[in-house]
Amino acid sequence: MTESESFDEFCIISLLDHKRTAGRVSELDRKAFIRVDVPATKNTSETTYLIPIQAIQYIELSSEADVLEYYSGSKKPTPRPKPYPPGKY
């Protein structure tokens, strides 16, 4: 992806402090921040976050339905599996 290409996907973002957020990632600046637009649900109001790239552990591409389920409390995403078992390199 070049600097001029746009990114517009629903994602679940896992942060380094073990918190998660989900929403539409509509701007991706690889050097500084991502913009996350959280949709309004019955449990949350519409919110926009600017998250520094250094605070992100990983980003999972998702669907709008998964993001709405995440905020409704009916479904929490499963943790990302570790790529290698500890001590088995």
Image (cartoon, rainbow, N blue to C red):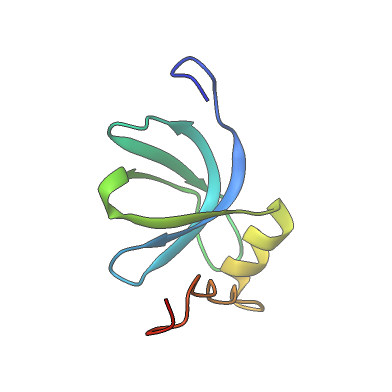
Q: Position of residue 88 (x, y in %)?
A: 44, 82
In the depicted structure, whether residue 23 falls above or below residue 20:
above
Q: Position of residue 23 (x, y in %)?
A: 54, 51
Residue 12 vertical placement versus 71 (above, below): above
Q: Residue furthest top?
A: 4
Position of 85 relative to 45 (above/below)? below
Q: Is residue 7 left or right of 85 when viewed as pictured?
A: right
Q: Quadrant of residue 89?
A: bottom left
Look at the picture and state if 16 lies above or below 8. below
Q: Quadrant of residue 24?
A: top right
Residue name at image x 69 percent, y 52 percent: 64
From this viewpoint, which residue is outermost toward the front? 89
Q: Measuring from the top left, give residue 79's x and y in whole percent.
A: 53, 76
Q: Residue at x 63, y 59 (%)?
A: 67
Residue at the spot 46% in from the left edge and 31% down from the top edge: 27
Report x, y in % for residue 68.
65, 61
Q: Is residue 75 left or right of residue 13?
A: right
Asked where in the image residue 3 lies, by quadrant, the reply is top left
State the residue in front, 50 or 47.
Answer: 50
Furthest-bottom residue in view? 87
- Towards the viewer: 13 or 75: 13
